[in-house]
Image (spheres, rainbow, N blue to C red):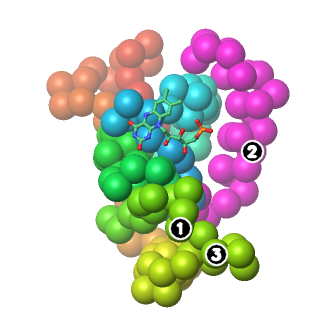
Amino acid sequence: MGGAGTQGSAGAVGFRDRLERCDGFVICSPEYNFSTPGLLKNAIDLVSRFRPQPFNEKMGLLMSASPSMAGGNRGLWALRVPFEHLGARVYPDMFSLARAHEAFAENGKLRDEHLQQWFEDTIANFMDLVESTKHYPCVKRAWIEFLGEQADAVVTRVE
Ligand SMILES: Cc1cc2nc3c(=O)[nH]c(=O)nc-3n(C[C@H](O)[C@H](O)[C@H](O)COP(=O)(O)O)c2cc1C
């Protein structure tokens, strides 16, 4: 993928296509300098230029892992901002795995049973919400970039 002006690249088209086929998405990301890694932000920026804008009304779950005690959680808060703007329904709970380099057992599960259960519950609860939203869509959003935006085809982000 290139810069945000090259949204027609194969990588961006593939990402857009995958988003269109799913009811919800899960992002698992490291934290770079207390924020979102540039590569991930660039991927989001690229697909955000397609119309219809693929993140709008999509359910999203955010997860992170890091060797630090914060588990990359600050990066997820930074990630919420563009997703909220793009109309994604970002799930309130997040999962951030601290001390990730020593968190896993040989069988691939987390050594801490309670943490493993929390991880599984977070995903199951998110999937329940995705499923119910698919069958009972009750919230529709009139997406506008900022109050005062004019309904001008050149500047508007309204779909
Ligand atoms: C440029 C850079 C910045 C980083 N900043 C953070 C940070 O703010 N917080 C953190 O917990 N880890 C930070 N890390 C460590 C990453 O959490 C760790 O490298 C990650 O698990 C590995 O992912 P990667 O292979 O995609 O870099 C940083 C790593 C890099 C390369």
Q: Is residue 9 magenta?
A: yes
Residue that badge 3 annotates = 105
**Is 16 inside the magenta-drawn segment?**
yes
Badge 2 element:
helix
- Identify the residue at image location x=48%, y=81%: 112
Looking at the rendered structure, the kind of residue marked 2 is Asp
Residue pointed to by mark 2:
17
Question: In x, y percent, where is residue 68?
Answer: 39, 50
Judging depth in this view, the residue of 112 and 35 nearest the camera is 112
Tell me the CA gap for discs 3 and 2: 35 Å
Q: Which residue is mark 1?
A: 103
Residue 125 in view here: no
Residue 134 drawn above or below residue 159: below
Give the image location of residue 73, x and y in percent.
36, 52
Q: Which residue is nearer to you in this view: 99 or 58?
A: 99
The N terminus appears in which quarter of the rendering?
top right
State the extent of the magenta-drawn residues as a range: 1-25
- Quadrant hosting residue 31: top left
Sequence-wise, the earlier of marks 3 and 2 is 2
